[in-house]
Amino acid sequence: MPNPAVRASSAAPAYASSWVRGVLIALAMAGFLTYFSAAGTGDMPWLWRLAYWVTVMAAGSLVSSVVGIFLERQTRLNTWQEVAFMLAIIIPLISVTVWLITAAFEQQTPQWRRLPYFVPPVAIISAVMTFLHMQVNRIPVQSHTYPEARITEPGETFRERLGFKYRHADILALSAEDHYLRVHTSAGETLILMRLYDAIRELDGIEGSQIHRSWWVAKDAVADVRRNDGRVALALKNGVAAPVSRSYAKALKGDGWL
């Protein structure tokens, strides 16, 4: 969900696999809702009920995808702002969509008085689906290197926030500590008041990736990859060990980090 300009470079394969996972999640949810006769659909024959929920989930996924594409272009939104805007937009749209689909399956004319009754179940299912998509499709936020002609110094915008001692040193990693960021550089460490997500967006010119919810690491700073009891950590050139989150490990492996 973060700004696609700072995502992994393998955008096409990642988008395709994300789409496939989204379809599988929607089908699994349709089967779950069919089995438990959710939202009062128990009176339908089970095949008709399955067709109903598959149609509902497909339509909801289509609406969510279109809204998601729109929100991805809003680069000023962080992940949780996108989630809030997403739910605020898709719940009314999907409620109307489900209202129309239900009337079609019941072979009746849509009745306006019934529309409000669709909002609570749609809101619950939309929230659950959004959470599942966030967990399954987590992509580490990345920064990229650019030709030197485009910038005067890698990570120039971010460097302006550092003290003079660290401003021109190699930026090795960032680690979040409450509201502060610990900046690991070749000249030592320093603390600044900033969010990790915002800092990564200012690191254009340095190839690096978020490896944990509280860590970003420059690719050139990695000296070794350490594995112990199923856990992975990146050993940096300054001797610091940066933990790799399991939720990001698959994407990092696909990008050649591990």
Image (tube, rainbow, N blue to C red):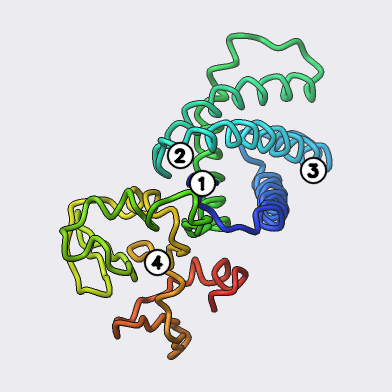
Q: Is residue 180 left or right of residue 146?
A: left
Of marks 4 and 3, which one's residue comes earlier in the chain? Answer: 3
> Label 4 to label 3, Cα distance in Å?
44 Å
Residue where numbered disc 1 is placed: 1
Instruction: Kindly report which numbered mark, 4 or 3, lies closer to the viewer in this rendering.
Output: 4
Q: Is residue 35 visible?
A: no
> Label 2 to label 1, Cα distance in Å?
9 Å
Q: Is residue 258 visible?
A: yes
At 40% across and 66% down in the image, what residue appears? 212
Residue where numbered disc 2 is placed: 83
Q: Which mark is residue 64?
A: none
> Callout 1 environment at 10 Å: few (<14), some (14 to 19), or many (20+)?
many
- Nearest the camera: 57 or 253? 253
> Label 1 to label 3, Cα distance in Å?
36 Å
- Nearest the camera: 100 or 241? 241
Q: Secondary structure under badge 1?
A: loop
Question: Which image quadrant for residue 55?
Answer: top right
Residues marked 2 and 1 touching at CB (< 8 Å)? yes
At 69% across and 34% down in the image, what residue appears? 62
Residue where numbered disc 3 is placed: 46
Q: Which mark is residue 212?
A: 4
Residue 191: % across, % down: 17, 62
Amino acid residing under circle 3: Trp
Amino acid residing under circle 2: Val
Residues marked 4 and 3 touching at CB (< 8 Å)? no
Residue 172: % across, % down: 34, 71
Q: Is residue 165 left or right of residue 230?
A: left
- Nearest the camera: 44 or 104? 104
Of marks 1 and 4, which one's residue comes earlier in the chain? Answer: 1
Residue 12: % across, % down: 70, 53
Q: Is residue 235 left or right of residue 93?
A: left
